[in-house]
Each structure stands twice: as structure tokens, then as C-alpha cells.
């Protein structure tokens, strides 16, 4: 029996240490992957919140046009008039000052956003409502541009829609 103990060289110890090292590496890489996936899910959620906020602002702008009885409010000033523009004013939605100085905030308090969504409306032109009949009642065309912000102010979504109305 003593003879068999002398022949042991500690191979089991080395194999078990290598096995523990491999399990540790798998555990560390698994936790890193989980952390990255968690960040991706959070960013996706933030983007979705910003999109929903922009959608609310877009619908609010379209409702303003829907409730108008005439288009004179759009022709009274070539520049900002409470978020209403002539198309010739050409507000740039990519510039931050457009959103702080020349847009309208949605009055509904939207939860989970860093700042309330905003919109502005541009009156584009009038065209015949029936292109085949130039004498038909003209339709007015508008462009609504909306900006929504997610939980972080750096997550922004811009949406635009075109709206046609016959006054």
C-alpha cells in the first residue's frame, strides 16, 4: 500500500485546477454577455419610449390642424407663430434651438421621459383636391414634425407626417 502512494504524482490536482479555471472563465464571460444584453434591452426600451412620445406629439400636431377652421393662422407670419410656420420659413428639426424656441410642447404629461415631446407644423401649399379637376375645392397641405425623448435626453426620435385638409 505504501508503494502505491509513492507512485501518485498529483495529476488529479492539476486536472481539477484546470477544470476550475475553465468554469471560472465560462462564468465571467457569461456575466459579461448578460451585462451587455441588459444594456441592449435598456437602450431598446429607451428608444421605444422616445418613439411613443414622438407619436403622441405627432398626433397632437395633427389634431391642431384638424381643429382649425381656416388657414389664416399659418399665413400671418413667415416665421414662428407658436409652432406654426409657412413652408418658406423652413425650420430645421436637427437644430436644438428649433425645439426650444419654435415648437409646441404636448400638454399631456407623458411619464418616463426626460422632457415632454414637442412638435411644429408647416403649411406647405394649396392644391386642387381632385388633380383631374383643377376647379375642384383646393386642399391645404401641412407637414407635422415631432420630436420625442426617452428616459435619457440623448435618446431622440423624430417623426414627420403630411396632413391634407379641405377648409
Image: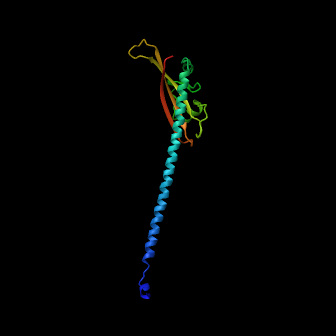
Instruction: Name the colouring of the figure.
Output: rainbow
Say whether residue 24 is left or right of residue 106: left
| Residue under the image location 52 percent in, 36 percent down | 52
Q: Residue at x 53, y 22 (%)?
A: 66
Front residue (pair 155, 86):
155
Give the x, y percent position of residue 30: 47, 58
In the picture, the quarter occupied by the N terminus is bottom left
Is residue 25 placed above or below 156 in the rendered structure?
Answer: below
132 relative to 27 in the view: left or right: left
Residue 75, image x, y percentages = 54, 19
Q: Decide which of 163, 21 is in the foreground and name it.
A: 21
Q: Is residue 135 left or right of residue 74?
A: left
State whether residue 135 is above or below residue 90.
above
Q: Residue furthest bottom?
A: 2
Residue 7, position as x, y percentages in the image: 41, 84
Query: Which of the 4 quarters of the picture holds residue 71?
Result: top right
Number of numbered callouts drawn:
0
- Farthest front residue? 1
Percent of width and height locating residue 81: 58, 24
Q: Residue furthest left?
A: 132
Amino acid at each position: 500500500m505504501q508503494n502505491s502512494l509513492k507512485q501518485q504524482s498529483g495529476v488529479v490536482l492539476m486536472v481539477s485546477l484546470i477544470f476550475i479555471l475553465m468554469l471560472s472563465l465560462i462564468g465571467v464571460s457569461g456575466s459579461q454577455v448578460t451585462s451587455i444584453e441588459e444594456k441592449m434591452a435598456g437602450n431598446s426600451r429607451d428608444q421605444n419610449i422616445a418613439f411613443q412620445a414622438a407619436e403622441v406629439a405627432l398626433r397632437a400636431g395633427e389634431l391642431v390642424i384638424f381643429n382649425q377652421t381656416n388657414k389664416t393662422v399659418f399665413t400671418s407670419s413667415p416665421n414662428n407663430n407658436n409652432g406654426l410656420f409657412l413652408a418658406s420659413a423652413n425650420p430645421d428639426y436637427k437644430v436644438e434651438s428649433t425645439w426650444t424656441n419654435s415648437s409646441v410642447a404636448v400638454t399631456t404629461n407623458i411619464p418616463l421621459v426626460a422632457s415632454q415631446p414637442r412638435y411644429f407644423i408647416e403649411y406647405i401649399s394649396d392644391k386642387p383636391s381632385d388633380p383631374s379637376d383643377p376647379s375642384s375645392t383646393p386642399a391645404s397641405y401641412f407637414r407635422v414634425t415631432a420630436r420625442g425623448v426617452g428616459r435619457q435626453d440623448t435618446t431622440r426620435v423624430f417623426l414627420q407626417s403630411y396632413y391634407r385638409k379641405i377648409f
